[in-house]
């Protein structure tokens, strides 16, 4: 009896394990790699382990002890991995400018020395008397950092180590996050305003009329996102169909700016995400027993009151789960704003992509990605809890 | 010598819920036994244990002297007919019927011949290339039956096989299955919650309640002398009245029914004078007349009369004591409020302790 | 009055939803160099360009290679997982299912950043295998949803019946479960292929210039130098997805029909 259950369970495990391994390696691990990229800062301490062990006790005044300098020279001598060394140099240079040229002179000198233990840094380069470089070196040692996650919300640590706001000109991550939420909210509201009546209309019709309405929702879903975005490009551009049509009927004299701005992004995203709003609402409305409206009317409620008191409250669960879905997808959107938005319409995804592919700043990309991931996961959790518990009985 | 099929103190629990409780059941070869009970009484679980889809938590099951409760279903050689027929939707009728023969590695030519013969028997040979979804409910049912019979299993198990059919077809299929049972000498275990189906088809009926057998007997005994209140109420209709036992003598009890009335009735075992018991009397066993006719005669008043087409139901009262009688027609002068005598034989009523 | 309002609203939204798709298609046949109306004359030059210009032709081939690879990966893995999660023999199946569906939810850019960091470490960045794996992660949820639905549609008593008729578990699987699950597997594979075909964001992060897919090529073409080749590519994609979608719908319809086991038809 127990053995049978065990056998069945191990069989099931055997079937599931390939995907489990695949997803753990190629889905969870990459996400983890992104999160660690935001927090791990071991480029320097990995290359200079001996220095790291000694320099922590230095008080930051003057220059570190003889022993620390010796350890530093020893580390430089032992560093053979060119790539790792290069990363360490880059990290140090970003903390104290001039570090690259300093090390560019120091490293060959140390490596060329016949007795590395006898090398005196101060004679190799007098700049080693500058406390600034040693402070940068010490501060680069801790293998973990909150620099990126603070920078992601426009904050940093000042000289004394306390957290302060970044100067207004330095970065604009908060602004971009706010903009992301704003655009997502605008798209959600637009989808809800169109989707709710549309779903109700579709549910109230029968036959071919209903089929046409549903087909119009499903067909775009089946069409490539790139195709739809390219199509909106054609429609919205200054010489595009919409401007031409409006000019032809004499409504406007010069073309309306519809593309490379907020309006274009919202129009195209609403088009892309509308099906995610219509379909949940539609399925909820279909689950409402048809005779409820008749029952309400038989009890003396006019059509309008029956709508307000019966149909609308019962379709709210669909509206809510559709809105959550649209909002959740919208905040992570990349392609549409990237192609149809202007510089001031870029959302958080564009910024992440910029840091990752443009400047190779994995730390900041990871930190911003983590924030987006956490927000999305939270919305998904709410969505999951909500959309399972709110089903109508028997629906 | 063990019986052909034997359950030996079999229990089945799902988690903390005990569905079958220390069941002993013996079925002989060639018998048609119905397992009858309300839903949740454990009857389907018993069938599933016999077929091998569930394993007993405790106890042993024997088939033909061999212990089988550890065998997987495909080694038990039992034909199972499922409630929804469970025909393979992706195979034709002929392929469905051939399936068990293929599993037994019967030679190809013989399979074709036996499938042909089996379909002939249920008069569905012309449908052999159809898909199950193209058949009517009754046809699907007959194919399912044929598929379960074609490999000549030692036992046929049926799990409410007629539940999805309409009344007329159901009655027709009842006769057909009964006929097959007689002609082929099949051993059939038949699960149903329909008492009339059990009464018409079975050699014996096991009435289940809450995982236990309340009574197992041939249909007539089950109907005429139910052993427990549950059986009396579940099978047919009955007047079940609380009564006091005055005396017991050779399986005949003298009881007082209230309102100053008393009667003599068949008594089950373990009944003694002075105890409170239930008196069960079938409505159709009551004869209404102007004068007593039989050893029990109660003077009653007609309280209500309901017309049912082929019969009437008459509500009789006397003070706070009341009975329902069933009769074909009423004499002309009996209207509501008239006095009548309700007569019945002691052998037609039972006193039950539980 | 109310009816007219209803009709106007419905028609307006249907036009809003469908107009972009229908607006782009004729431009595949324009003779102009601008992706714009009016069309001066009809010509095949952009379709010709699509199939002969190196960047476009390689991108189509790449899309087929990567889409095919990702589909195979995702279909095999997703089908196995759906079978394993089917009977509820595993503890925490709900959690597993959520994990497997998560790639649908995680923003593509987030996954892209992680993938890029991770694949660089593995030495798989800018390789076909790397892109195929990245696409497969996105495709697996679609396969699991589709196959699980097909498996759920199989009445357990059908498998019990096979078992009682003498079929050992492997035979039950081969003769009953698998044939009944095939439509779900095929439509899962179609979904997977369509997903890979349309994927841009992950491709931006993990693919090198040699693995540029059609969608990726369209993306940079729209961004940098839009011309009617994009419309020609769109036509190709629409025809492709419509064929795939039609196939999937056909399969679903057949599956539904065969699932109606107790269809009451008077004969």
Image (spheres, coloured by chain):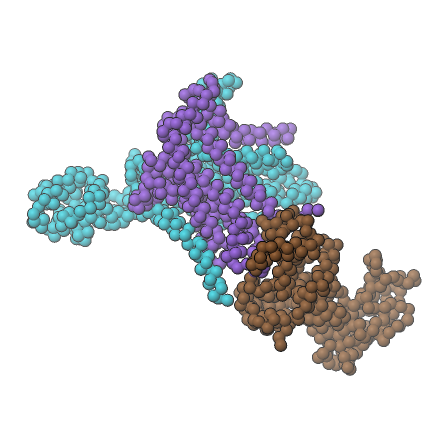
Chain colours: A cyan, B brown, C purple
Which quadrant of the figure has residue C202? top left
Asked whether C87 or C263 is in front, the reply is C263
Residue A328 drawn at (x, y percent): 45, 41
Residue A127, compared with residue A23, is above or below; it is: above
Instruction: Please indicate whether residue C8 sits to the left or right of residue A242 in the image.
Output: right
Instruction: Please indicate whether residue B96 sits to the left or right of residue C69 in the image.
Output: right
Asked whether B44 or B147 is in front, the reply is B147
Residue C155 drawn at (x, y percent): 58, 53
Residue B33 seen from this side: no
Q: Which residue is found at the position 42% from the left and 39% from the top?
A: C67
Q: Which residue is found at the position 61% from the left and 71% from the top?
A: B64
How many numbered discs, if any?
0
Residue B52 drawn at (x, y percent): 57, 64
Residue C57 seen from this side: yes
Q: Which residue is found at the position 71% from the left and 71% from the top?
A: B217
Residue B101 drawn at (x, y percent): 59, 58
Asked whether A15 or C174 is in front, the reply is C174
Q: Which residue is found at the position 60% from the left and 45% from the top?
A: C257
Which quadrant of the figure has residue A291? top right
Residue B223, compared with residue C17, is above or below; it is: below
């Amino acid at each position: 009896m127990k053995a049978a259950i065990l056998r069945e369970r191990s069989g099931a495990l055997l079937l599931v394990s390939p995907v489990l391994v695949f997803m753990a390696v190629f889905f969870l691990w990459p996400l983890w790699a992104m999160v660690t990229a935001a927090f791990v800062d071991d480029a320097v301490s990995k290359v200079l382990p001996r220095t790291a062990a000694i320099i922590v006790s230095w008080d930051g005044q003057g220059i570190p002890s003889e022993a620390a300098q010796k350890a530093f020279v020893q580390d430089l001598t032992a560093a053979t991995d060119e790539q790792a060394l290069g990363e360490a140099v880059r990290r140090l240079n970003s903390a104290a400018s001039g570090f690259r040229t300093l090390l560019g002179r120091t490293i060959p000198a140390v490596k060329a020395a016949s007795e590395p233990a006898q090398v005196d840094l101060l004679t190799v380069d007098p700049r080693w008397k500058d406390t600034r470089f040693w402070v940068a070196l010490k501060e680069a040692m801790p293998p973990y950092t909150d620099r990126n996650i603070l920078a992601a919300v426009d904050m940093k640590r000042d000289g004394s180590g306390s957290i302060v706001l970044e100067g207004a000109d330095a970065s604009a991550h908060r602004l971009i996050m706010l903009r992301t939420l704003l655009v997502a909210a605008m798209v959600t509201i637009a989808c809800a305003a169109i989707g709710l009546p549309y779903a109700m209309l579709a549910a109230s019709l029968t036959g071919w009329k209903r089929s046409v309405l549903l087909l119009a929702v499903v067909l775009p879903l089946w069409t490539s996102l790139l195709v739809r975005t390219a199509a909106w490009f054609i429609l919205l551009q200054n010489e595009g169909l919409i401007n031409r049509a409006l000019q032809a009927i004499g409504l406007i004299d010069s073309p309306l700016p519809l593309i490379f701005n907020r309006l274009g992004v919202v129009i195209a995203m609403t088009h892309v995400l509308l099906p995610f709003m219509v379909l949940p609402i539609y399925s909820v409305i279909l689950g409402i027993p048809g005779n409820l409206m008749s029952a309400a009317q038989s009890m003396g409620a006019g059509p309008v009151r029956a709508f307000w008191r019966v149909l609308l409250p019962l379709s709210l669960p669909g509206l809510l789960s559709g809105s959550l879905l649209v909002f959740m997808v919208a905040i992570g959107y990349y392609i549409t704003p990237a192609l149809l938005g202007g510089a001031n319409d870029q959302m958080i995804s564009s910024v992440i992509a910029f840091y990752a592919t443009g400047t190779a700043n994995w730390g900041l990309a990871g930190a911003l990605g983590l924030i987006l991931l956490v927000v999305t996961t939270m919305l998904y959790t709410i969505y999951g809890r909500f959309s399972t518990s709110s089903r109508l009985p028997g629906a | 010598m063990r019986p052909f099929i034997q359950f030996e103190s079999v229990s089945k629990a799902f988690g903390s819920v005990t569905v079958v409780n220390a069941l002993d059941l013996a079925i002989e070869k060639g018998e048609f036994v119905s397992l009858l009970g309300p839903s949740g009484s454990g009857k389907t679980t018993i069938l599933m244990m016999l077929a091998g889809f569930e394993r007993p938590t405790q106890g042993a099951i024997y088939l033909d002297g061999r212990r089988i409760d550890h065998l997987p279903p495909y080694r038990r050689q039992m034909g199972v007919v499922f409630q929804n027929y469970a025909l393979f939707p992706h195979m034709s009728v002929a392929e469905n019927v051939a399936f068990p023969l293929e599993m037994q590695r019967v030679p190809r030519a013989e399979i074709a011949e036996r499938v042909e013969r089996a379909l002939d028997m249920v008069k569905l040979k012309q449908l052999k290339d159809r898909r199950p979804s193209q058949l009517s409910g009754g046809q699907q049912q007959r194919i399912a039956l044929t598929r379960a019979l074609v490999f000549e299993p030692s036992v046929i198990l049926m799990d409410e096989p007629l539940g999805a059919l309409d009344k007329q077809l159901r009655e027709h299929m009842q006769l057909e299955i009964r006929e097959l049972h007689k002609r082929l000498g099949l051993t059939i275990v038949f699960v149903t919650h329909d008492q009339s189906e059990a009464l018409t088809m079975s050699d014996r009926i096991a009435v289940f309640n809450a995982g236990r057998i309340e009574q197992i007997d041939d249909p007539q005994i089950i109907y005429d002398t139910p052993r427990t209140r549950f059986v009396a109420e579940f099978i047919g209709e009955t007047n079940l009245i609380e009564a006091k036992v005055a005396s017991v003598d050779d399986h005949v009890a003298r009881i007082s029914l209230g309102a100053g009335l008393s009667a003599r009735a068949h008594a089950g075992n373990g009944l003694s004078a002075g105890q409170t018991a239930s008196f069960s009397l079938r409505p159709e066993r009551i004869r209404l007349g102007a004068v007593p006719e039989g050893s029990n005669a109660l003077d009653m008043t007609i309280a209500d009369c309901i017309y049912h087409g082929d019969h009437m139901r008459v509500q009789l009262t006397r003070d706070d004591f009341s009975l329902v009688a069933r009769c074909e027609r009423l004499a002309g002068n009996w209207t509501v409020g008239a006095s009548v005598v309700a007569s019945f034989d002691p052998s037609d009523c039972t006193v039950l302790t539980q | 009055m109310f009816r007219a309002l209803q009709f106007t609203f419905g028609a307006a939204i249907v036009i809003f939803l469908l107009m972009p798709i229908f607006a782009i298609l004729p431009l595949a046949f324009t003779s102009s160099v601008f992706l714009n109306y009016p069309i001066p004359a009809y010509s095949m030059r952009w379709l010709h360009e699509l199939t002969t210009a190196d960047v476009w032709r390689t991108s189509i081939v790449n899309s087929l290679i990567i889409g095919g690879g990702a589909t195979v990966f995702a279909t095999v893995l997703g089908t196995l997982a759906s079978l394993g999660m089917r009977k509820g023999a595993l503890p925490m199946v709900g959690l597993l299912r959520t994990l497997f569906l998560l790639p649908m939810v995680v923003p593509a850019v987030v996954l892209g950043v992680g993938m890029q960091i991770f694949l660089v470490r593995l030495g798989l960045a800018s390789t076909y295998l790397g892109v195929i794996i990245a696409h497969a992660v996105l495709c697996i949820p679609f396969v699991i949803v589709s196959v699980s639905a097909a498996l759920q549609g199989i009445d357990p008593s059908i498998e019990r019946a096979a078992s009682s008729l003498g079929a050992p578990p492997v035979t039950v699987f081969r003769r009953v479960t698998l044939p009944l699950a095939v439509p779900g597997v095929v439509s899962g594979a179609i979904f997977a292929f369509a997903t890979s075909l349309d994927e841009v964001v992950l491709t931006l992060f993990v693919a090198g210039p040699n693995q540029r897919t059609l969608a990726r090529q369209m993306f940079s073409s729209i961004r940098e130098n839009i011309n009617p080749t994009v419309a020609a590519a769109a036509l190709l994609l629409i025809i492709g997805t419509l064929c795939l979608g039609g196939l999937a719908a056909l399969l679903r319809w057949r599956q539904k029909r065969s699932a109606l086991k107790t269809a009451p038809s008077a004969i």
